[in-house]
Image: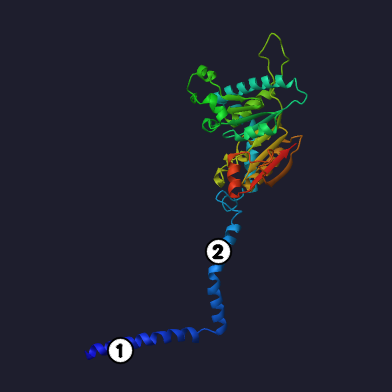
Amino acid sequence: HSFLRRSEAKQQQQRHNCLPRLFKITTTKTSPSFKSTTCRNMMSSSLQQPQNKTHTSNAEVKRTRYTIDETVCPPTNTTTLQSILTKHAQSLPLYLSSKPIPKHTAVAFQEVKECISLWQSQQEEKDDKGGIILDSGCGTGKSTLLLSQQYPNDLVIGIDRSVTRLTKNKYYNKKQQQEEVMTEEQNDNEMNNMNFTQFIPPNILLVRAELASFWQCVYNDNLQPEQPPNDDDDDHHHSWPKIKRHYLLYPNPYPKPKRIQSRWYGHPSFPLLMNPIISGECVIVRSNWKGYLEEFALSANFVEQLQEQVSKWNMEGPTRLFFDNGDEANVPLTNFETKYVDCGEPVYELVLHR
């Protein structure tokens, strides 16, 4: 019993000594100014914490998960870019002569020519005759439909190689949903019986074709001399009409340094794209990747010097776009742009015009 009493007394003494010892550590080793500052910080910590979170979120609005900058893809070395462009410009004749045209693209091009001839015959009755607008890489065709509303007097041609993307468009899908994708090995007669072009009145064409090959068809067609009309011959040649505007709206092609030659300005067809026959009077490129547009502009200037073109490019941008849903002429044209606007990702535009 005496042992237990001594043990309990010892434990009580330890508990009694614990508080004073902790108090002494706090008071003796902390200066009054530091103690008061610490107290103020502790008292306001719960109020400051939400404010810090709000400030951080506002600072991060400019960067989203879609942002592509120098940390994601560093700029291409100028010497490397010029070397690639020089090679492609010098080898363009070989590229045009040796690259075969896929059969479905050749068929699609002939269908487009027939639709253009019909559309041009309707334009003869109008005082304000329209022109051709190309929407290259149109995806689902949303941009093509919106452009047709902005330019009702022009024929807007949307081109994409993916039947999967095009069939997401309800207008294209009406006629194409029952047709199967044809392969190169299938019979030419079966290929010719398919429709790769969907005309949507009054001024829309949606086309399934390989882009670079389609441009090649346009270029070759313009090199042929136009034949005068003959009443006895319905197959006389009409040259491809002049392109007024050419849109390239796919926003972020291959943001990796090793994939530069998969981007338009690094592709072998870029000198062809910059030819006045294909580029037309104006080229509009959009992207959330500002560095991509800057390199596109640099490449266009360099190819212009290599090709010694008479008409020079005048460039505007890249400039950031601010959309207004109340203005039909100033709305996001693609699903990409709509997605970017919803999350605060900026969209830039580069305009090249002659």
Percent across and percent down for residue 315 are 73, 42
Mark 1 lies on a secondary structure that is helix
Q: Is residue 95 left or right of residue 281?
A: left
Marks counted in the figure total 2
Marks 1 and 2, the one that precedes in the sequence: 1
Percent across and percent down for residue 209 are 57, 28
Marks 1 and 2 close (CB-CB < 8 Å):
no
Is there any visible trace of residue 167 in the rendered image? yes
Percent across and percent down for residue 51 are 58, 64
Q: Quarter of the image holding residue 317?
A: top right
Which residue type does callout 2 highlight? Pro
Taking the view exactly as shown, the residue that stands out farthest to the left is 1
Q: Residue at x 61, y 43 (%)?
A: 337
Mark on residue 9? 1
Crowding at dot 2, Cα within 10 Å, few <14 / some 14-19 / many 20+, comes out as few
Quadrant in which the C terminus appears: top right
Taking the view exactly as shown, the residue that stands out farthest to the top is 232
Is there any visible trace of residue 275 in the rendered image? no
Q: Is residue 71 above or below residue 112?
A: below
Q: Quarter of the image holding residue 146?
A: top right
Q: Is residue 53 above or below residue 41?
A: above
Mark 2 lies on a secondary structure that is helix
Q: Nearer the viewer, residue 51 or 222?
A: 51
| Cα distance in 3D space between marks 1 and 2 | 49 Å
Q: Nearer the viewer, residue 233 or 141?
A: 141
Please give the residue where the numbered disc 2 appears in the rendered image: 50
Q: Nearer the viewer, residue 154 or 13?
A: 13
Taking the view exactly as shown, the residue that stands out farthest to the right is 127
Percent across and percent down for residue 13 are 34, 88
Crowding at dot 1, Cα within 10 Å, few <14 / some 14-19 / many 20+, comes out as few
